[in-house]
Image: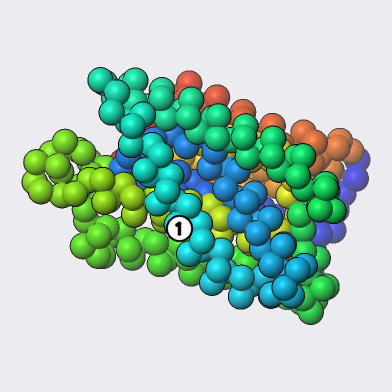
């Protein structure tokens, strides 16, 4: 049995919270898009990869600091979200909501395969076998807090995630746009009869959801290596968060993300103590949680 020290244990658990913050960002976007437009976006994780890849290219080619690149990445992928909302309008005109959801799954699954296929072939041609930005290259070192050594990027990124989460919460619950979004999530047909332009709301929701996924990618490349084939895995993780938190629940997506990130790293820590390959086995934790929640509590932790 391998016993880690208190500082190493605290570091791993705090990194789990950070990973949970990343999951919360992509899960919130997925929840908003599904809640308003009834589109189950299987390509959502691929937009995280594209956001991270864009950040790396801006850094390596133009020398732009990753945190400053947020000012480019977020508007760029908000525009991508607008274009995607137009792409999905035809599939959503199916006779029933069930058929519309099925059509959205097929279309976005094809889009995911397209992104991963092009990325896997094009990235190595330009010298990108994986996408990552080491913290040392942007002048951020380690921070020692009460004998716990943390990569400074983790702390900065965690603050960014919290600020963005608070901002999105304010948008959804304290603005007129958020009121129309929640009305469309509650009942799209009734919202339409009340004079709400549901197509416009869907367009804005896609812009917010896709840009949040890309923002998560910008943060993620500072702490890990992203490859073109990681998109579908990240989408599955985000779906697990959404199901755990409660389908359509905004607060549930935030809570579920942090819980899964923390529990995944906690399991990894226990497996390391038991002399197992923690990171390899811990990757199955979100899938186990997904199955358990679907069997025991399909409505999730929080109802919409």
- Looking at the figure, which quarter contains the N terminus? top right
Q: Residue drawn at (71%, 58%), measured in percent from left and top?
A: 221
Q: Is residue 142 above or below residue 13?
A: below
* Along the viewing direction, whichever of 138 and 200 lies nearer the viewer: 200
Q: What residue lies at 81% left-to-right and 40% top-to-bottom?
A: 278
Question: Is residue 267 something one can see in this rendering?
Answer: no
Task: Report the front residue among 141 and 255.
Answer: 141
Which quarter of the picture shows residue 115? top right
Residue extending farthest to the left is: 194
Q: Residue 169: x and y, percent?
A: 37, 61
In the rendered view, does 197 fall on the left or right side of 103?
A: left
Mark count? 1
Above or below, 219 relative to 256: below
- Residue at 36% x, 29% y is 91
Q: Quadrant of the C terminus?
A: top left
Find residue 246 and report its horizontal and vertical position in percent: 40, 38
Q: Position of residue 256 (x, y in %)?
A: 50, 45
In the visual, does 53 lie left or right of 245?
A: right
Residue 261, position as x, y percentages in the image? 62, 48
The residue under the point 57% across, 48% down is 47
Task: Please identify the quarter of the rendering in which residue 51 is found.
Answer: bottom right
Left or right: 267, with 197 as reference point: right
Which residue corresponds to mark 1?
78
State the scheme by which the image is colored.
Answer: rainbow
Front residue (pair 145, 81)? 81
Q: Is residue 159 visible?
A: yes
């Amino acid at each position: 049995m391998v016993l880690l020290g208190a500082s190493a244990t605290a570091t791993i658990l705090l990194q789990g919270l950070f990973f949970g913050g990343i999951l919360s960002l992509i899960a919130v976007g997925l929840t908003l898009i599904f809640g308003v437009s009834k589109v189950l976006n299987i390509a959502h994780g691929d937009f995280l990869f594209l956001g991270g890849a864009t950040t790396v290219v801006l850094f390596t080619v133009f020398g732009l600091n990753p945190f400053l690149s947020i000012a480019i990445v977020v508007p760029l992928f908000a525009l991508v979200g607008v274009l995607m909302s137009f792409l999905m309008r035809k599939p959503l005109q199916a006779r029933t909501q069930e058929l519309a959801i099925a059509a959205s799954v097929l279309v976005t699954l094809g889009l995911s395969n397209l992104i991963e296929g092009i990325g896997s072939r094009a990235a190595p041609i330009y010298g990108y076998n994986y996408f990552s930005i080491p913290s040392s290259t942007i002048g951020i070192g380690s921070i020692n807090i009460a004998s716990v050594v943390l990569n400074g990027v983790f702390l900065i990124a965690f603050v960014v995630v919290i600020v963005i989460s608070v901002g999105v919460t304010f948008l959804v619950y304290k603005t007129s746009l958020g009121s129309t979004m929640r009305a469309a999530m509650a009942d799209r047909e009734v919202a339409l009869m009340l004079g709400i332009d549901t197509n416009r709301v869907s367009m804005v929701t896609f812009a917010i959801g896709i840009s949040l996924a890309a923002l998560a990618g910008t943060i993620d490349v500072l702490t890990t290596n992203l490859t073109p084939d990681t998109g579908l895995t990240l989408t599955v993780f985000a779906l697990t968060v959404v199901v755990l938190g409660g389908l359509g629940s905004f607060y549930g997506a935030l809570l579920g993300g942090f819980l899964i990130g923390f529990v995944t790293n906690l399991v990894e820590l226990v497996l390391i103590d038991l002399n197992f390959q923690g990171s390899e086995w811990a990757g199955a934790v979100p899938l186990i949680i997904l199955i358990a929640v679907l069997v025991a509590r399909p409505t999730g932790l929080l109802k919409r």
